[in-house]
Image: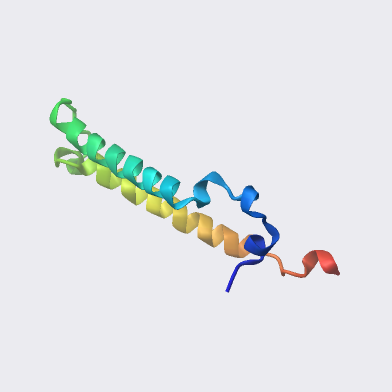
Amino acid sequence: MKDKRDQLRTPHEWDWFDKPKNRRLLWILLWSACVLSVVAELFIEREPHFPADEYFGSYALIGFAACALFILFAKGIGYLLKVKSDYYDE
């Protein structure tokens, strides 16, 4: 079953992110950035401020956890701000 947005769009109105080729490129770029950030820790001398900072890859793990928490927070806000689908029809 198609989404209402898909039914209203013409083939020329598809977003750049909707094309499978571009989605794959974005995934490759994302994973490349993740790997580069972990590999960069091999060459950077860092000064730990907390006990967790002493472990290899801790900054990547903290960044991932923060991103996941932001996504969960945004989902929660989305549920709070959601309006009925016929809100503008009334």
Quarter residue 33 falls in: top left
The residue positioned 38% from the left and 48% from the top of the image is: 24
Relative image position of residue 50 (x, y in whole percent): 22, 39
The residue positioned 19% from the left and 44% from the top of the image is: 52
The colour scheme used to paint the residues is rainbow
Q: Judge from the rendering whether residue 11 lies leftward or rightward of residue 43; answer left or right.
A: right
Quarter holding the C terminus is bottom right
Q: Judge from the rendering whether residue 37 lies leftward or rightward of residue 45; answer left or right.
A: right
Counting every numbered tag in the picture gives 0
The residue positioned 61% from the left and 67% from the top of the image is: 3
The residue positioned 19% from the left and 42% from the top of the image is: 57
- The answer to whether 10 is drawn above or below residue 2 in the figure is above
Quarter residue 41 falls in: top left
Relative image position of residue 66 (x, y in whole percent): 37, 48
Quarter holding the N terminus is bottom right
Q: Judge from the rendering whether residue 58 lies leftward or rightward of residue 87; answer left or right.
A: left
- The answer to whether 74 is drawn above or below residue 22 in the figure is below
Relative image position of residue 76 (x, y in whole percent): 53, 61
**42 or 14: nearer the viewer:** 14
